[in-house]
Image (cartoon, rainbow, N blue to C red):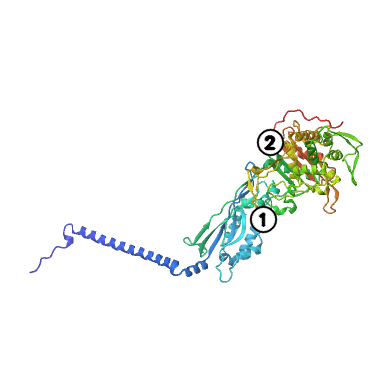
Amino acid sequence: MTQPRRPAARNRPGAGKGDQKGTLRGSSEIRLRIGLIAIAMVLSLFGVRLLQLQGLDPKAYAARADAEGLVTEPLPAKRGNITDRNGVPLAETVTGVMIVADPQRTRANADKIAKILADKLELDYFDLLDNLRKTAPAGKPAIRFTYLARRVPATVAQRALDAVKAAGYKGVDTRPDPVRDYPARDVAANLLGFLGTEGKPLAGLELAFDKRLAGKDGHETYEVGGGNRIPLGENTEVKPVNGKDLTLTLDRDVQWYAQRVLRTAVENTRAESGAAIALDTKTGEILALADYPTYDANAPGKSAKSDRGSRALNDVYEPGSVEKVLTTSSLIDAGKVSPRTRITVPPALPVMDRTIHDYFQHDRIRLTLAGVIAKSSNIGTVLAARQFDHAQLWQYLDKFGLGHGAGIGMPESSGVLPVLPSWTDLTQANIAFGQGLSVNALQMVTAVNAVANGGELISPSLIKGRASNNLGAEYGTDVAKRSRVVSPQAAEQTARMMEMVTTEGAGTAPGAGIAGYRVAGKTGTAQQVGKACKCYDGSLAVSFAGFAPADDPRFTVYVVIQKPQGAASGGGTAGPVFRKILTYLLQKYAVPPTNTPPAALPVEW
């Protein structure tokens, strides 16, 4: 029997919508399956590659990495700052860059790139050319990184890089590379030192405390291919460790002023050199240590090598009459004399085979010990010192620190206090008034400061707090040493005698006095030994040391001028420098006058 035919689906009500939905579901399922298959294929490829790289074919991977190149770049540590006592930077690290190249990309145009960089950076053309063409030894990976210039100011480097890019050349780039800067240029340069072209310290505090300041550089190694860094390639990083800061006791403003006043004096007298030091009397902190000639620490190569060190630490000389302060305070401490002790001073004094004179001609005169200091009589000092045997005077001067380095953490010449067995009567006579021994400027101001500080010697400090130098020794205010040299009474009596030096009509340096303040001081003039003849050649070292207020000292200042030309003296040449620096200190730190009567000791009898 023939079956009746069903009507077509399109003729049935509702039949079209159901079939359409089924068709859409089928298409979506097909697309989903295709997507899943594609993802699976990609993951499989990654998995196979990973298995190949990590397990099946590590040598092939290493060979390819070598062929493409592993680049190791430094991550420079930031060098610690050196600041003054108030945190003002004297040496700091500022933004800079290194200019680097990929020789694989620069070799073809090396000569043209080298010319651009040589002109822009003032570098050697042939050194640049060698680096831009650098190749690895046979069998070694290709070189993909080389230095062209280090520690270049960022703006200078960018101009050079822009010029290379503008010419259409590639393969030259920059990386961070801190630059050392000395913002005050020559201020404290003789103490700070400087860094060489390779960033290595060559002098001063930069060298002595390098281990503290330098920190430790890090590095980063990564894989490159086709001249570009591979994002998922090998990458390792060792972070840099920045250096530590170093805080000094210096006051930048006082240091700047002391240097300018000293420079004027040295230039006006056509002297060979000079040094000026200011201490906080109570703490021994160095507020200023000035040298002249000096140099710009940002451009040390433009100055003579002899001008880059600190003469105040390294030049030794015979101190002259400032030494009389130490001799007379020792005699007073031992109970041998007093400021009023009467001394008959002849025109000349034979000692062994020599004759000692005063700087001024006179007949037989009668001076008190205060008068011997006020008039700076060599003969009077020698006669007073005869109350000591050789050992007694030597022991006091040894306690004052003569013959010993001051010890501030930097190299210094310690001078010479002749050993006791070699002493004769002539040795003692000469040393009593400052000849026949040698000191550096820091030793001398430290010794005088002991008198200012009530007879207690304080080791001077250049470092605020404490810090270890490269040898591991600690220095600074926290580890400063104190020792008794003479009694407070002996120190006070010596200070009163020193006041007579700056008293009009009584002493040799009234011009070193400061209106409204009691000022204790002492002049010094010493013959110098010539380098050629090894004998006294007629040249002088003139100096002045003192403190104020004399009855309650706050600051101690010492100035020495080496080999001035023409008429020169401690009071007339070094005295004005002393007065200006001390006045500046008293004003800056708002030290009021003590408003007590000045010393009025008899100088004659």
Q: Earlier in the sequence, mark 1 or mark 2?
A: 1
Marking on residue 196: 1
The quadrant the C terminus occupies is top right
Residue 253 visible from this viewpoint: yes
Give the CA distance from mark 1 to mark 2.
Answer: 36 Å
Marking on residue 171: none
Viewed as shown, does residue 124 lie left or right of 388? left
Residue type marked 2: Lys
Kind of element beneath mark 1: loop
Kind of element beneath mark 2: helix
Q: Position of residue 57 (x, y in %)?
A: 45, 70
**Depth check: 519 or 414 in front?**
414
Dividing the picture into quadrants, the one containing residue 453 is: top right
Q: Position of residue 564 (x, y in %)?
A: 82, 45
Residue type marked 1: Gly
**Depth check: 124 or 53 in front?**
53
How busy is the neighbourhood of tag 2: few (under 14 within 10 Å), some, or many (20 plus)?
A: few
Residue at 79%, 48% in the rendered image: 419
Is 336 drawn above or below residue 52 in the view shown?
above
**Depth check: 296 or 273 in front?**
273
Q: Position of residue 126 (x, y in %)?
A: 66, 64
How busy is the neighbourhood of tag 1: few (under 14 within 10 Å), some, or many (20 plus)?
A: few
Q: Are marks 1 and 2 in contact (CB under 8 Å)?
A: no
Considering every residue shown, the one lying at the far left of the view is: 1
The quadrant the N terminus occupies is bottom left
Considering every residue shown, the one lying at the far bottom of the view is: 138
Name the residue beneath numbered marker 2: 588
Viewed as shown, does residue 136 lie left or right of 447? left
Dividing the picture into quadrants, the one containing residue 158 is: bottom right
Is 121 drawn above or below residue 391 in the view shown?
below
Viewed as shown, does residue 76 lie left or right of 349? left
Residue at 75%, 52% in the rendered image: 306
